[in-house]
Image (cartoon, rainbow, N blue to C red):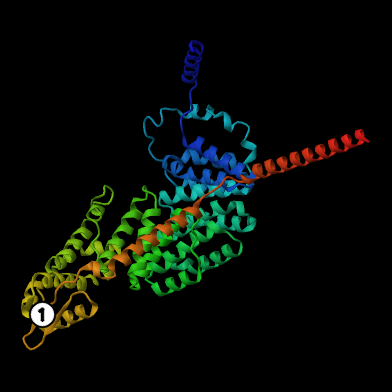
Amino acid sequence: PTKNSKTNKEVKEERKEVKIPPRTAASELKASLILIAKGVKTLQSTYIARGIRKIYWIRKHIKKSDLVDSLKKFVPKSQNQQQLLDYVNLVEEAMEVEGNDGVAKDETKSMEVEELKGATDDYEVLPEVRVFLDLLLLIFLLDNGKIKEAINIAETSMELIKSHNKRIMDLISSRVYYYYYIAHHRLGEPSIIRNKLLNMYRSACLHHDVPGQAVLQNAILANYLHYNMYGQAEMFCNVTNAIERDNNQYARYLYYTGKINAIQLHYSDAEENLSQALRKCPRSAVGFRQMTTKLLCIVQLLMGDIPERSTFFEKDLKKSLFPYFKLTQAVRDGSLQIFTDALKIHGSIFQNDGMSSLITRLRHNVIKTGLRKICISYSSISLASICEKLKYDSVEDIEYIVAKAIHDGVINATIDREKGRLMSKETLDIYSSDEPSRVFNKRINFCLKLRNEAVKAMQYPPDAHKPKREKEAEEAKEAKEAKEKKAESKEEKKKKKK
């Protein structure tokens, strides 16, 4: 044990002596390019996915000088290197932050991780690397407000993708398609590229470009919804199939379909889509979670349900969901006064969120909730008193509203037209109805669907079945040899006896 303890101490000291180079944008870029080159060589998209995953960190830390160095190093002069550098030079150099990872520029150039040595020849002229660098430049220009230049880069990159038409490039090309749509959306002219997006989606389907299909599908839906073309968006959803492979894109697709269903009065389908989108989206996507939660709250209120109080007080959602919390209070209390006050105070926020058309439908739900409370409290009440309590103007209108509520099963009562009174009946026990069985069935379906999705999402390493097959083949070979040996030994024994 003493020898082992000494060796452990020595190992710890050796580990302390080894200095790991700091993480810089240049080193991360180089590592991602090596992963892409490895993925192209082995034809495994998992390496390319790992390389693309580093974009988020690179995007936050990359500088103009890093991008210029990488373009000079990896893009040949024959492939419009000078044009790309001119695009980068349009962006003014930002002020350097003191103590950036505590490393000077000269030191970072000399530092190299051992794994990256000798790998520079692999990714200098690869088309995948060129598209990846175009993607980084496209994101860099978008972040710095150079939208038209970013569109030019995206178009040249898409021409390069089209000329090569390689399936190993699909993951990178899908990102290019996404930022191409974002650039046009920021420019305020997404309708210009609608036909182009539809043609690109058609070619992606023909070439079995699954990541491209997922991104382009969402881009087309976003384009339709931007101009409130809900009918065409619904038709597009009906003739296409959802791509569930990419979790982020599938969550976005569920949000769009949920919004379409909410506008088309399919509230139960909308609630299912939106709740599923919230489960699938990452926790870091705060903006997406805010928009989805807002829409889900409105849909639940339109269905007659009250959202849980805890959803309004989550750390990242508390401030943005405050107007919707006030709206929920108005619907729960059944007070038209609180509802109209909330609309007056927060009307501009609802308009910016694109929820005003759905929120106007909530007025009937507020009245229904108020009627339900009145029926529970009073066995008999005049229609004039109902008008006063709901702060409604016309008695005739309230009579029609009450009749509609009785017809829809919202309240269990009758109207005495001669006396002008509402006579409420005894409330039935909910457990004597089919409501518990419907809720139980809904939960079972949810669990089964979740299980099926988990089975579909299971991933296995490539060629994982081969070792098992090889082992089975060896065992079969050994068994065959053993049988042959037994047969030979039996024949020898017979010969000896003869």
Residue 148 seen in the figure: no
In this rendering, is residue 274 above or below 378? above
x then y, percent, for residue 92: 42, 44
Q: Secondary structure at mark 1?
A: strand
Q: Residue at x 41, y 49 (%)?
A: 143
Name the quadrant of the C terminus: top right
Disc count in the image? 1
In this rendering, is residue 344 above or below 126? below
> Which image quadrant is residue 337 in?
bottom left
Q: Is residue 291 left or right of residue 487?
A: left
Q: Residue at x 52, y 27 (%)?
A: 111
Q: Is residue 166 left or right of residue 87?
A: right
In this view, the residue farthest toward the right is 498
> Which image quadrant is residue 486 in?
top right
x then y, percent, for residue 475: 71, 40
Residue located beneath label 1 in the image: 422
Q: Residue at x 38, y 29 (%)?
A: 99
x then y, percent, for residue 316: 28, 49
User: What's under tag 1, amino acid-wise?
Assistant: Leu
Q: Is residue 224 left or right of residue 43?
A: left
- Of residues 132 and 14, the one nearer the viewer is 14
- Of residues 99 and 376, the one nearer the viewer is 376
In this view, the residue farthest toward the top is 2
Residue 18 seen in the figure: yes
x then y, percent, for residue 410: 21, 74
- Badge 1, how many Cα within 10 Å: few under 14, some, many 20+? many
